[in-house]
Amino acid sequence: MTAAAFDPLDDSPAVKRRDWTIISLIGAAHSCSHFFQLVLPTLYLSLAAEFGYDFVALGLLASAFFLVSCLGQASSGFIVDRVGPAPVLRFGLACFVVSGVLIGLSGGYAMLMLAAVVGGAGNSVFHPVDYSIINHRISPPRLGHAFSAHGLTGNLGWALTPIFMAAIIHVANWRIAAFAAAGLVAFVLALVWLGRDLLAGKNEASAAGPATESAVQPSLARQTVAQTLATLLVQPALWGAFLFFAFTSMSLSAVQNYTIPMLGHVYGIDKVLAGTALSAYMVAAAVGMLAGGFLVGATPNTERTVAVSLVLAGVLLVVLASGSIATSFAVALVALAGFCSGVATPSRDMLIRRVTPKGATGTVYGLVYSGMDVGSSLAPVGFGVLLDAGYSRGPWVGAAIGFIIAAALAMWVARAVGARAMATA
């Protein structure tokens, strides 16, 4: 069923309730994506004890998950633009349910690998789906809040997995934990099914994109996949956005994977406190996302918010890498860097919205967000080589460089979009 379009001037209490209900549903679904990304890693010790696998074999499961996710994310946007986001969202959640059941029933490596592949296929759909629904169904006054809530719920999903899985493993076993993870996602799938009418259709005031472009561009959703690709691949802003996500994800990966050992090497901080610092980074990033949602409505120049926030985050990481601050301030600086990077997130999503031609929301978000998977797959190895070579501060410096390059790319993308708008006016 396709929901009716809404009056762009209507901002009644009913419209606000509809918007926040949609934001809540999408947030719950997005948290499942991040939650399930860590299900297999939280089972590594249990699987090693059960089957005797080494960490190379276990790590390959996560690599397979993200490889499938990367390939699927780049292509699933085409499906979203042609069949609609709601059924694709249900498919993604259903894949997680199947993956969790397969993990719980697994009797060997082959079934675990199948579970990783199925889970990766499910994970691939969320960015094209979520951003398509947000851009098409949320009223303009609440777009910034929708983007910030989307990022926040993803972080909460990451935070929930270790606690959820560890608690169930403690009171039962790892198989029950896998089944419980599947059950949790199944509950969210039921909510999404009940709210399917809200997630269908388009709010034309939100979906059209920049007025100067929507009036002259035909909808790419009516073109073939080959025609859509031909249109998109010649747009420099699209590739700038792809590189932006690749560099920001490389920076985040460096922080997530190596902040704990770097705090130990540079400041002599023990693993427990260093782990707390990393948690502080993620929590502060979530708070920054909430703050960033208000900044989206305060300025139309979202690229400046992105650039300033990421440059500040990069500078803070360089200060950390210098080893020149007191140990007692190191944890606070890690958290502050997380806050700055989080502030950029809602404005970043609004910037990508400006890149998107009419009828290609899912396709564009799928393509540019696949840059995240590329960066996340390359960074751990590259920065690990630096640490092994004795450059104990290298990942922080590399993360700072990545943030600064991403800031420059955000400004460049905005100029490219502006030039395209002027050319089509």
Image (tube, grey):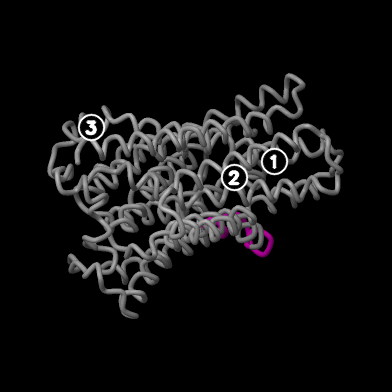
Which residue has dot 1 on it?
316
Mark 1 secondary-structure assignment: helix
For label 2, count other residues whose C-alpha is less than 10 Å away and answer few (under 14), some (14-19) or many (20+). Answer: some
> Marks 2 and 3, how far apart in space?
35 Å
Q: Earlier in the sequence, mark 3 or mark 1?
A: 3
| Amino acid type for the residue under numbered disc 2 | Pro
Q: Residue at x 29, y 43 (%)?
A: 356
Q: Foreground: 401 or 299?
A: 299
Residue 197 higher or lower than 49, as above or below = below
| Amino acid type for the residue under numbered disc 3 | Leu
Quadrant, the N terminus: bottom left
Mark 3 secondary-structure assignment: helix
> Marks 2 and 1, how far apart in space?
29 Å
The answer to which image quadrant residue 402 occupies is top right
Residue 296: give x, y in percent of width and height: 45, 56
Quadrant, the C terminus: top left
Which residue has dot 3 on it?
229
Mark 1 and mark 3 in contact (Cβ < 8 Å)? no
In the figure, is residue 328 to the left or right of 382? Answer: right
Residue 414: give x, y in percent of width and height: 39, 39
Residue 33: give x, y in percent of width and height: 46, 52
Q: Which mark lies nearer to you, 3 or 1? A: 1
The answer to which image quadrant residue 51 occupies is top right
Q: Residue at x 26, y 27 (%)?
A: 234
| Amino acid type for the residue under numbered disc 1 | Leu
On residue 41, the disc is 2
For label 1, count other residues whose C-alpha is less than 10 Å away and answer few (under 14), some (14-19) or many (20+). Answer: many
Q: Give the range drawn in magenta.
A: 168-178
Residue furthest to the top in view is: 389
Q: Earlier in the sequence, mark 2 or mark 3?
A: 2
Q: Foreground: 234 or 225?
A: 234
